[in-house]
Image (cartoon, rainbow, N blue to C red):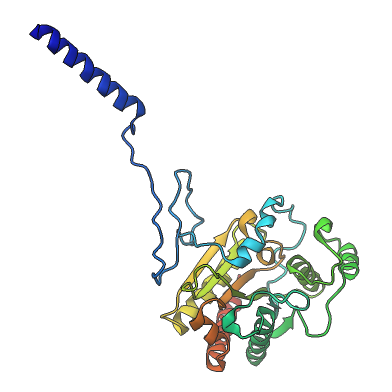
Amino acid sequence: MKKALYLILIVAAALLLFSCSFFGGGGTEARTEAVPDSTSTSPVTEAPTMEATEPPEGTETETEVPTETETATAEETALPGPPEITYDVNAHLGSKRVLIDAGHGFADPGCTSDYLNGVYESQITYEVATLLAQKLTEKGYEPVMLRGTDSFPSVAEIRAAVAELGMFSRDDILYENNIFDAYERTLWGNVIHRRNPVALMISLHVNALPTAEYVRGTELYYTVDNGCAEPSAKLTAFIETKLKTAFPDTRLRTEGCVWNDSYIVTKWTEMPSVLVEMAYATNPEDAELLFDDAWRDKYTSALAEAIDSYIATRS
């Protein structure tokens, strides 16, 4: 009787071990995502997945919560990869012309928030861009404003210039809708560059993240795999250094994006380019800074010094 009982216990134990092995963990721990604390003052990050790859050298490993601007351009990730390079990637060398893109404008006002009191991104970027142009002029450079206040080229004008210069373009995303959108601005910037080379393009924007008002600070983006990736990274590094020096207590994030995750104004350009998200309209402290003359002066001085340093050391 005892032998039978022992036999039953041994069989039961064996079955239990088999079931644990079959349905259990296989010796690895599951990765979990941390739930962000809504009262935290740190930016929300996403936990890496099992398939996560190493980021490009010189970029941060964290992944921020997408901003409204990032969400708006998400459809661009469906576009094909970089076109075959048919332009002179060294045309920017020797130029002292700086192309300044005041983000959005005209029928595309950009973002706003309750903290901006009815003012839109396009107005702020134009005012800051104008101030940056003044500082670059003082340093002996020739600033070129990509967006003026009166008018912008029609799609017909852009297409004619593209054909004249034998440029690559995505005609299927050129729309005659009275909006000088990001792709049209970038393509027109390339036209300007082809006709009289510019040293670089800097695109100024205001960020927004209504779902996390505590997120604030500057974010810099460039493309790591287009024709001018190396000088774009160098330009961005100078801007990062100068802004950190000018605003040591401000959050600053830099990201080198691959083609399908890049912003239009950095991946389609034929010259070194960087997108600067200056501050968050949805953060009350940042929104206040955007209207502060002293902050604007200090911010544009840092940008102008970075551009000056980059151009002086480019090769």
Q: Quadrant of residue 67?
A: bottom right
**Horizontal side, residue 139 vs residue 43: left or right:** right
Q: Quadrant of residue 261?
A: bottom right
Measuring 31% from the left and 34% from the top, which residue is drawn there?
27
Measuring 35% from the left and 25% from the top, which residue is drawn there?
22
* Residue 199 higher or lower than 83, as above or below: below
Q: Position of residue 293 (x, y in %)?
A: 57, 93
Q: Position of residue 268 (x, y in %)?
A: 71, 62
**Count of labels in the image:** 0
Toward the left, the furthest residue is 2
In the image shown, does 313 or 269 lie closer to the viewer? 269
Q: Position of residue 288 (x, y in %)?
A: 53, 86
In the image shown, does 94 or 285 lie closer to the viewer? 285
Measuring 22% from the left and 14% from the top, which residue is drawn there?
11
* Residue 119 higher or lower than 232, as above or below: below
In the image shown, does 265 or 302 lie closer to the viewer? 265
Measuring 74% from the left and 82% from the top, which residue is drawn there?
144
Q: Quadrant of residue 69?
A: bottom right
Q: Position of residue 117 (x, y in %)?
A: 61, 86
Which image quarter holds the C terminus? bottom right
Which image quarter holds the N terminus? top left
Toward the front, the furthest residue is 1
**Horizontal side, residue 193 vs residue 19: left or right:** right
